[in-house]
Image (spheres, rainbow, N blue to C red):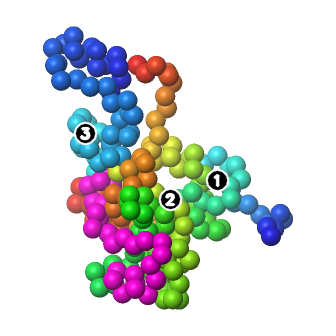
Amino acid sequence: MSDATAAKEKCKGCNREIDVCAFCQEPECPAAICFKCQNSELKQTLLHPHAHGG
Amino acid sequence: MSPRAAWRLETLGFGDVYDYVDGKNDWMAAGLPTEGTNAEHPRAVDVVRKDVPTCGLKEKLGDVKARVRAQGWDAVVVVNDQRVVFGLLRSKELEKDPELLIEQAMRPAPSTFRTFVALHEMLHKMVDHKLESSPITTSDGRLVGLLLQKDVAAALEKDK
């Protein structure tokens, strides 16, 4: 059973609450980061402003 | 490249031009070569250990640990027969009960990274998060190898 009162971590990039650090998946990570910020910082995704390319 | 760039190159006289529909990141994630100024920066693909040991979900931890240690490793990546990454065991997980199955002992669904990630960015993150190693995969989750923090640091030192 989950503990609804347990404090969630916050992404150090965007400050939103996350269940676990996307990088190390360790609880109580002091440098916790969400997947979105991680992929952005590591440039693992590119923005696609035009669906038709260009 | 984009379809427009491909068409333009053909008008400039290039005859062997293709539109890679899945995009540049997918190309780089597969470890394929690139050119240009960005290609000069050291990336994960340059130092990833492709010889990292692997194991299956149903193997016994004790057997895997003996095999891995005999090869001089303290980490093993859990994959299926398509080399898709299911889990990871670092030294901490390898020390668990040797009677456990790998699927019971592993760290499931570890974060994976692409081959084109810049080494200086990975080193910064690996140090911050105290990670000795991280799996590198293609876009569709297939194992390329294991990136070791010590290799990243050595490569960047050499690149100075």
Identify the subunit bearing mark 3.
B
Q: Which residues are magenta?
A: B43-68
- Residue pointed to by mark 3: B34
Q: CA distance from mark 2 to mark 1?
A: 16 Å
Observer-side mark, 1 or 3, equals: 3
Q: How packed is label 1: few (under 14 Cα within 10 Å), some, or many (20 or more)?
A: many
Residues at badges 2 and 3 in contact (C-beta under 8 Å)?
Answer: no
Side of B47 relative to A35 (left or right): left
Q: Regarding mark 3 in the picture, which secondary structure is present there?
A: loop
Q: How packed is label 2: few (under 14 Cα within 10 Å), some, or many (20 or more)?
A: some
Picture residue at 49% right of the left edge, 21% below the top: A50
- Residue pointed to by mark 1: A11
Does residue B37 sit above or below B98 in this rendering? Answer: above
* Residues beneath discs 1 and 3 located on the same chain: no
* Residue B26 x %, y %: 38, 40
Q: Quadrant of the C terminus of chain A?
A: top left
Q: CA distance from mark 1 to mark 3?
A: 33 Å
Q: CA distance from mark 2 to mark 3?
A: 25 Å
Given residues B55 and B116, the one toward you in this image is: B55
Q: Is residue B152 visible?
A: no
Observer-side mark, 2 or 1, equals: 2
- Residue pointed to by mark 2: B111
